[in-house]
Image (cartoon, rainbow, N blue to C red):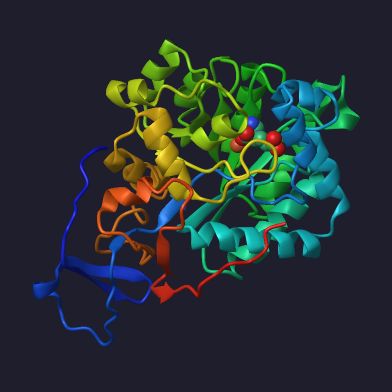
Amino acid sequence: MAELGVLTDAAVLLDGRAIAWVGPRADAPAAATTVEVEGVMLPGFVDCHTHGVFGAPRLDDHERRALGTDYKAIAAAGGGILQSVRDVRARTEDDLTAITRTRLAALLAQGATTIEVKSGYGLSLEAELKQLRVIRRLAGAQPATLVPTFLGAHEIPPEYRGKRKEYVTLLCEEMIPAVAREGLARCCDVFCEPGVFSPKETRAILATARRHQLALKLHADELEGSGGAELAAELGALSADHLAAISDAGIGALARSDTVAVLLPATMVFLGARSQAPARRLIDAGAAVALATDFNPGSSPTMSLPLVMALGVSQLGLRHAEAVMAVTVNAAAALGLAGERGQIAPGFAADLVVAAVHDWREVAYWMGGSVVSAVWTAGSACPAVSAPVS
Ligand code: NIG
Ligand code: FE
């Protein structure tokens, strides 16, 4: 993960939506148009974990937590995920589309050219489909590539309190088949956590998802360990995400598998947690580590992958090169896109980010700064963006 190819005085040749050539500027093939770029060019970043479709920010949760109440107690008191569920259910698809468009623009402006977006604030067939349709509409209507993930198993909805078995049945027998039938998601995710979905329930839901040709992802071992990482590796999931409470057995299981460990340091910082996922131990054991924003209204309202990279260095002990790998090559692998995104190499998507800095390590250094000065997706320059997000 620490082996980056760094070229100075380089040129990149684009052909339509793909990269055709990269190498020393002196050897560059002739091109129809030339654009001079100053600074450092990187592969477009891949944000492989967001909950990008939601309504209002959760400011009361934020304040209660500042005053000492923890994430689970806030949820039990009517805040948390279910507050965003009430909000999303009440909004129209058009309204959600307009809000999400501005937030995706903010993610893109900070360099995210491929963005995974989860549902999970609907928790009914109709409201989950509404979220996924928002993603589908925006996939063709703004410059970033979107990867939709069905997260109907984000929480037990209020009307299924005390009837969790029936909700799991609804997920498996109605929601997953409907999502797959309409082609609305590429992946299926489950919040596998004590008090949310157990490993047994997670296994049943993901087995159904796999039968419907969805790739698998898990929110695993976020706040307390429950064997989520081991389950992700066993099921051949694309990724196991969070992992602040991963066990030694979980680290070993991920290291022996192709499942990517997606770490979300901004979440632990925003929640005021004192701990972070054991990134060094994961890397040293041989696991592939990616970083993502976890952009969501409850635990990570950040739209900046460069900020997350800086937290990766200062909170997780990653080297700068590992932080770059974690938002490019490995993040693409966490979405099953390692062969087409996350590298400046012939045949890869012409998604590029320029940072107005002198040394590439500065991208993971200016904590909370705006280092990204230009973005290309599918070979086209993106207009400068700064829009309201709330
Ligand atoms: O990844 N862990 C579960 N889901 C989100 C939080 C969602 C929310 O609080 O709205 C997460 O941290
Ligand atoms: Fe998440």
The C terminus appears in which quarter of the rendering?
Answer: bottom right
In front here: 127 or 290?
A: 290
Q: Is residue 137 left or right of residue 124?
A: left
Residue at image point 36% right, 56% down: 340
Question: Which part of the image, by quadrant, shows the N terminus?
Answer: top left
Q: Is residue 140 left or right of residue 277?
A: right
- Looking at this view, is 269 or 210 the one in front? 269
Q: Position of residue 186 (x, y in %)?
A: 56, 49
Q: Is residue 244 left or right of residue 348?
A: right
Q: Residue at x 80, y 41 (%)?
A: 85
Instruction: From the top left corner, tell me how far across and down residue 277 is, in percent.
Output: 46, 24
As drawn, which residue projects farthest toward the top? Answer: 248
Above or below, 49 against 375 in this view is above
Q: Quadrant of residue 254?
A: top left
Question: Which residue is drawn at the image coordinates 68% and 46% (left, top)?
Answer: 119
Taking the image as drawn, is residue 7 in sight?
yes
Residue that appears at 69% across and 53% down: 132
Note whether 251 is above or below 341 in the view shown: above
Q: How many marks?
A: 0
Tell which of 227 and 99 is nearer to you: 99
Q: Outermost residue, left direction? A: 26
In the current view of this chain or complex, which residue is farthest to the right?
Answer: 159
Residue 286 seen in the current view: no
Could you tell me residue 275's position as x and y percent?
Answer: 51, 20
* Image-quarter location of ligand 2: top right
Task: List the single residue furthest toward the bottom.
Answer: 32
Which x, y percent locates residue 100? 68, 59
Vertical placement of 186 versus 8: above or below?
above
Dividing the picture into quadrants, the one containing residue 173 is top right
